[in-house]
Each structure stands twice: as C-alpha cells, then as structure tokens.
Amino acid sequence: MTASIWFGALEQGLLWGVMVLGVYITFRVLDFPDLTVDGSFTLGAAIAARIIFEGYNPWLGTALALVLGVTAGLITGFLNTRLRIAPLLSGILMMIALYSINLRVMGSKSMLSLLRMNTIFTDVAALGIPRDYAVFTLGLIVVALTCYLLYTFLLTEVGMAIRATGDNEQMIRSLGVNTNSTKVIGLALGNGLVALSGAMVAQYQSYCDVGMGIGMIVVGLASVIMGEVVIGNKTLLRTLIAVVIGSIIYRVVIALVMRLGLPTTDLKLFTAILVILAMSSPIIKEKFRPVKLKGR
C-alpha cells in the first residue's frame, strides 16, 4: 500500500471515529440496541450538505447536524421510555422515519454534490494548514476533544448514572435514579456524535447520499470490537482511545481488502462477516482449545 492510501485510511478512521464513539455510548455504555444510528448518520450529512449547497456557512451546517442528531436521539428515547416501545423497535421506527425526513432535507433528491463548494476542511486549509493535512488536522482535533469531553462527562454523577443504567438498570433504579432520563441523555449524546460524524464525512467525500447511513451500526460495532480486542478496555480512557483506534484499524482493513480486488458492493457483507468472527471469537477459541491440548 502506498503512503497516500495509509494516510487516507487514517483520515477516514478519525472522521468515522466520532460515529464509532456514538455507537459505543449507546451499545456499550447504555446497552441499548439503537438502530437510529443508520438514519442519524445520514441526517447529519444531509443537513450539512443542504446548508452548504444553499450557500451558507459550513460550520453552521455542521453544528446544526449535531443539534438535530441529538434531537433524533431524544425522540428515540421518548418512544422507548414514555410510549413503552421496545428498544429495538424504537430505533427501527426512528430509522425508517429519518429516511423520509432526510429526503425532504435534501430537497427530495437522492444525492447532493458538494464539489467545488466551501467546506469546513477548506476553511481549515485557509488558515495556513497544508491542504493535504487539513482533514487529518481537523479530524484529530475533533476526535481528541470528543474523547476528552466524553471522559469528563462519564465521570460526573450523571455520566456514572448512565454507565450504571447500562450495567444494571434494576440496581441503579432501586437507588433512586431515574433510568428513563439516563437512557434519553445517552441516546441523545450518541446520536448527536453520529450525526456530527455524518456531517464531516459528507464534506470529506464532497457529496451526500440518502443511503450512505445503511449499515453504519455494523461498521460501528466492528470498529468497537476490534479496538477493544487490540487495545483493551480495562479503564474508561483506554476504552475511548481503543474505540477510535478500532475505527482506524477498520478503515485500514477495508483499504487492504479493496487493494486485493474485493468489489465495493461486497463491503457490507465483509463487514458483517468481520463482526460475526469478532463476536464469536471466544467460542471459536474454546472449541479449538482441546485440539491444541491433544496435539501436545
């Protein structure tokens, strides 16, 4: 692989890393199977792309994507906590609703092109940072700031309550904590990060497609699992770093597979197989352990 491909995988890993952090909040911390992610990723991309397409400030579009991603998470939380709809179904319903909403945001178009338009990355390059390093620089700053803020927040009283809700909801509820509130906060935070990532990815790719969020939840899970396997999850800070590293590793693996000639249409299948292997690795190791012992 050439240096440019390695560097491109690093850039993408950082931008998608924000999305993976959002998936980590909902799936790992909150233990909530939130499929809203597939819709909120596209929502962030659609909002940013439409704002830029209409000639407005790209930073405004990126900030608005974050706000509307939080809103999507709030609605999912409302469906689950107030209307008593099952977690999985709540996410599915919101994901379906967001598909139509995203089309409306994009002006009933399936794709918006941002070629030759001003983005947050061109603004960063205008500050004197070499254009080739603008994406990496901004991506690294956003990821580092997100990890710091998440680490600080999850160590607060509210953050600890959210983590406890995911670990043992019945126990933390018996201590007087309103688990409905912690679920809503966690879902809002996770989907906000996912939408922010979508906004940055759309500007990086110079287009927004209504189907670009399909399978994002699987990509996020694959990145989280790979990061935890390689780096570990003994402490909170280590886990947050592992999640981002996992996103980078995933992008490198995808780049390697693409170099080997795998069609782009098979990427989702490859990702699904990768997640299956990662999640079933303890069982696979257990099955082959007796064979190794006999060989000795």
Image (tube, rainbow, N blue to C red):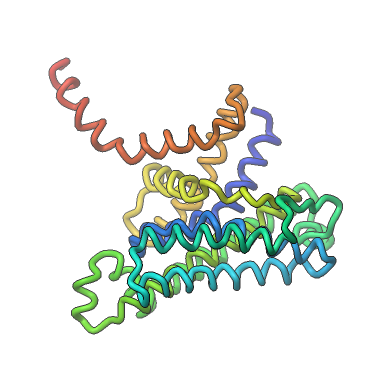
Residue 230 versus residue 169: which sits nearer the camera? 169
Instruction: Pinpoint residue 97: horizontal percent, then vertical percent.
Output: 54, 62
Instruction: Relative to 93, say whether 282 is above or below.
Output: above
Residue shown at the point (44%, 61%) measured from the top left: 91
The residue lying at 51 percent from left, 70 percent from top is 149
Question: Which residue is found at the position 35% from the left and 64% from the top?
Answer: 30
| Residue 130 showing in the rendered view | no
Q: Quadrant of residue 127?
A: bottom right
Q: Answer left or right for 56 relative to 137.
A: right
Q: Residue at x 38, y 74 (%)?
A: 159
Tell me if 275 is positioned left or right of 113 in this view: left
The answer to whether 205 is drawn above or below residue 146 in the figure is above
Query: Where residue 51 sits: x, y (%)?
Result: 76, 66
Spot the residue most to the top: 295
Note whether residue 32 is visible: yes
Question: Where is residue 182 drawn, in percent x and y?
Answer: 36, 75
Q: Quadrant of the C terminus?
A: top left
* The one of 221 and 82 positioned closer to us in this rendering: 82
Position of residue 244 relative to residue 84, above or below, is above
